[in-house]
Image: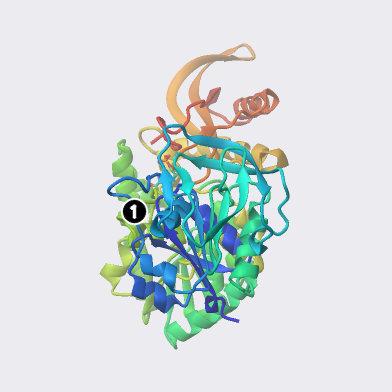
């Protein structure tokens, strides 16, 4: 069943939570897309959307340049839910009154239900909700009524008495509103009358049918890195077109310990994907000789990768399509580049390829968020060690060795890094860690081992928590773990006599050291 048959449109007024609304709606089984608040009304009409959600936003509807959607949206007879700024906008557009307040209501509040309504089914008096707003409704528009009040606001939830137009002052999408999901569920199923067609399973079915149709008899080439996105892309396309998918996996000499073996085992041996493995170790390391500058390292690795990938594509011959692991946040970023939501940083390792190679793009994940990609990966039977893999930069260990990259330094870093990975991965408590790795600082310091003086390198350990890599905080690892990591690295890795822990957050530092 094609899940596109039912759609919820989310209009983005610049809230930091807009993507969270989308993720929650999809978790509840309904496919949704985010549009800029000023999206042309005809486009919205063509979507045949089952419902519209107006996000929150940092502006005040009382300001001159406040973002406003087309008023006609309220006349379309499509159910609407306005959240925070969305509620204030509905109020203003329907000629109610908003009072500008100097004091922000921020944090937990309790709601009390004034009137029974399908939107609030399952919610009770005293339930906690999360508020974050400055302006408030002063007078309801004609034809609207209040459904609930909170400690501070007489209009915590409102609805039109004639139409399915709703507004809530609080944020149902955040986890600080424990019954928020119930409310969204009510909106989707009781008010918009959705069926719930979106799931990892229906995504896989629809994506496979799409890929088959799009590619016809054509061949597809795909760069495999072993990361989650490219792994899911490859597996999905392989399911659709079998050996007409040609995956290229390049060993750029700066991969982690056992990485080559793990990728070959998973994709060639277990998933039986048509894999071309190219050992480019010497080529990359030669090109990196004497290079110290991080950006130069990045460029060299990126350029060589494209060169090798093109060579392989020529060898395959008759290729028409290039597969890429573009995700939904990148798509929203590019379609609404002037839109209000904060953008997410992303690195496209094969970015320059399609233009030069005149290939058509296949981007089967362009509708998905990262957590959905993982669920789809599980649905496809991809091994857990790949699904749970932490992000690993395209330039690999080259940007984790400060200064010149040499074979000896790589050997040291690989050993130290594998100890960090092993200790962190085996401990279930650290599941929410975003990245954990080692950095080689090739500065020699003095130590003593047994009766011998040593003069060896420093290893830094970096462990961070993050939502999207835009900001990150260092993980407060227990002393016992730090102690174990330090002991193991110094005892087991030849060439290291000192271990330090990086306690900088991002910003002002970055996650990687180079
Ligand atoms: P920074 O160091 O900027 O990293 O805080 C943010 C995230 O991006 C990853 N990263 C890269 N990924 N090519 C990549 O594919 C790169 O050149 C690159 N530089 C940083 C980093 O691992 C982190 O997840």
Query: Above or below — where is 471 with respect to 258?
Result: above
Q: Report the front residue among 447 and 50.
A: 50
Could one spot residue 279 in this view of the protein?
no
Q: Where in the figure is residue 396, as x and y percent of width and height?
A: 45, 46
Q: Where in the figure is residue 264, as x and y percent of width and height?
A: 57, 62
The residue tagged 1 is 67
Q: Is residue 264 left or right of residue 330?
A: right
Identity of the residue drawn at 30% across and 55% down? 338
Dot 1, how many residues are within 10 Å of its Cα: few (below 14), some (14-19), or many (20+)? Answer: many
Identity of the residue drawn at 36% across and 33% down? 403
Q: Report the front residue among 297 and 42.
A: 42
Query: Above or below — where is 134 with respect to 10?
Result: above
Quadrant where the C terminus sits is: top left
Identity of the residue drawn at 46% across and 54% down? 86
Q: Where in the figure is residue 116, as x and y percent of width and height?
A: 69, 59
Quadrant where the N terminus sits is: bottom right
The secondary structure type at the circle numbered 1 is: loop
Query: Above or below — where is 417 with respect to 334?
Result: above
């Amino acid at each position: 069943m094609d899940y596109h048959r039912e759609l919820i449109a989310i209009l983005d007024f610049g809230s930091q939570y807009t993507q969270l609304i989308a993720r929650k709606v999809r978790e509840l089984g309904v496919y949704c897309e985010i549009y800029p608040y000023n999206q042309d009304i005809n486009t919205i009409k063509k979507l045949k959307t089952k419902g519209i959600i107006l996000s929150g936003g940092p502006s005040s509807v009382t300001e001159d340049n406040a973002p406003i959607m087309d008023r006609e949206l309220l006349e379309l007879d499509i159910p609407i839910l306005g959240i925070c700024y969305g509620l204030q906008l509905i109020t203003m557009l329907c000629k109610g009154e908003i009072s500008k307040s100097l004091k922000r209501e921020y944090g937990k509040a309790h709601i009390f239900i004034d009137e029974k309504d399908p939107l609030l089914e399952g919610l009770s008096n005293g339930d906690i909700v999360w508020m974050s707003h400055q302006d408030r409704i002063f007078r309801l528009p004609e034809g609207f009524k209040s459904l609930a009040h909170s400690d501070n606001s007489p209009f915590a939830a409102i609805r039109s008495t004639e139409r399915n137009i709703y507004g809530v002052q609080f944020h149902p999408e955040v986890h600080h509103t424990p019954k928020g999901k119930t409310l969204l569920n009510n909106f989707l199923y009781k008010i918009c009358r959705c069926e719930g067609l979106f799931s990892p399973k229906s995504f896989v079915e629809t994506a496979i049918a799409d890929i088959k149709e799009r590619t016809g008899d054509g061949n597809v080439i795909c760069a495999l890195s072993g990361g989650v996105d490219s792994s899911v892309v490859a597996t999905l396309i392989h399911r659709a077109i079998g050996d007409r998918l040609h995956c290229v996996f390049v060993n750029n000499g700066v991969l982690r310990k056992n990485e080559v073996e793990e990728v070959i085992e998973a994709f060639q041996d277990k998933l039986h994907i048509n894999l071309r493995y190219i050992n480019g170790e010497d080529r990359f390391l030669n090109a990196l000789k004497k290079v110290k500058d991080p950006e130069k390292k990045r460029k060299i690795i990126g350029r060589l990768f494209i060169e090798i990938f093109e060579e392989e594509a020529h060898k395959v011959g008759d290729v028409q399509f290039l597969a890429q692991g573009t995700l939904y946040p990148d798509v929203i970023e590019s379609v609404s580049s002037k839109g209000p939501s904060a953008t997410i940083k992303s690195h496209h390792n094969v970015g320059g390829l399609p233009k030069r190679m005149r290939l058509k793009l296949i981007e089967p994940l362009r509708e998905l968020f990262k957590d959905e990609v993982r669920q789809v990966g599980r649905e496809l039977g991809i091994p857990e060690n790949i699904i749970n893999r932490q992000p690993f930069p395209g330039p690999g260990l080259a940007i984790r060795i400060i200064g010149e990259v040499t074979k000896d330094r790589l050997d040291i870093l690989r050993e130290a890094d594998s100890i960090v990975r092993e200790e962190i991965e085996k401990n279930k408590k650290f599941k929410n860690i975003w990245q954990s790795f080692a950095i080689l600082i090739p500065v020699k310091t003095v130590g003593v081992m047994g009766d011998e003086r040593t003069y060896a390198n420093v290893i830094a350990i970096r462990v961070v928590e993050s939502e999207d890599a835009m900001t990150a905080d260092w993980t407060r690892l227990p002393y016992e773990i730090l102690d174990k990591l330090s002991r193991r690295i110094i005892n087991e890795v030849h060439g290291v006599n000192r271990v330090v822990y990086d306690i900088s957050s991002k910003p002002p530092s970055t996650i990687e050291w180079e």
